[in-house]
Image: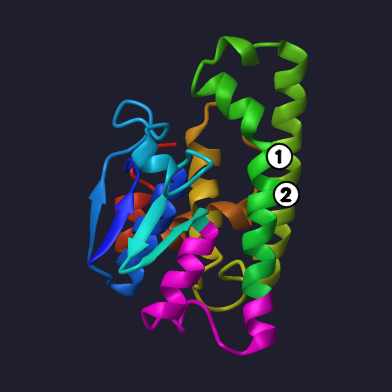
Amino acid sequence: MLRILGKASSINVRKVLWACAEIEIPFEREDWGAGFKSTHMPEFISLNPNAMVPVIQDEDLVLWESNSIIRYLASRYNGAHLYPDQPRLRARVDQWMDWQASDLNKSWTYAFMSLVRQSPEHQDAKSLAAACGQWSRHMEVLDRQLESTGAYVSGDEFCLSDIPIGLSVNRWFETPLDHPDFPAVRAYYERLSRRPGYLLHGRNGIP
């Protein structure tokens, strides 16, 4: 059975859990990370030298990096409805997954650490204002894309790119800051909320 290492509150672990829910993959999960078993233990470092969750073990395969994991799961476990084989369609999915990991993910770091984690190192007012503005600018990019598709990030149908971005949208709404009005993002949030996997692992009260 698929083994998932990582605490269920981690946004990156939640990507994997939601993907498993969508593809109906049975798994066993173990709590690793802050508040649980340390990812700096030799046992974990031997699996992921970066000491970060999630990690999966699928038979003799060990894999880390959450977006790589969900791509693998969709390819391995009959998830072509989420991650198409056709190169042009797959490239569009990959494009938005990579944008989430490289651009959107970085835009929220300071604001999230300040407003949700209450980190003492992230309480500079000017830096926080700049970070909130940067986050809003990236959400505006997403709003325009969703307005264009009228449905999901990569097109008419729910697909793998909606998992990391859907979790990012939940984090946006769950973080206590002034939210500009992005109607397409709000409609997307409600659309995703009709999916049981999103209610379990996305819109579940955890930012």
Instruction: Say whether residue 204 is visible.
Output: yes
Q: Which residue occupies 69% across, 30% down?
A: 132
Q: Quadrant of the C terminus?
A: top left
The correct choice, above or below, for 185 with respect to 19 in the image is above
The residue indicated by pointer 2 is 140
Please report the bounds of the magenta region as a residue range: 67-91
Snapshot quadrant of residue 153 = bottom right
> Amino acid under label 1?
Ser
The residue indicated by pointer 1 is 136
State the scheme by which the image is colored: rainbow
| Dot 1 crowding, Cα within 10 Å, few <14, some 14–19, many 20+ | many
Percent across and percent down for residue 117 are 49, 21
> Amino acid under label 2?
Glu
52 sits left or right of 37 in the view: right
203 sits left or right of 92 in the view: left
| Dot 2 crowding, Cα within 10 Å, few <14, some 14–19, many 20+ | some
Query: How far apart are the alpha carbons under marks 1 and 2?
Result: 6 Å
Q: Secondary structure at mark 1?
A: helix
Residue 168 colored in magenta in the image? no
Furthest toward the bottom, the residue is 86
Q: Secondary structure at mark 2?
A: helix
Snapshot quadrant of residue 113 = top right
Marks 1 & 2, CB-CB < 8 Å contact: yes
178 sits left or right of 190 in the view: right
The correct choice, above or below, for 174 with respect to 124 in the image is below
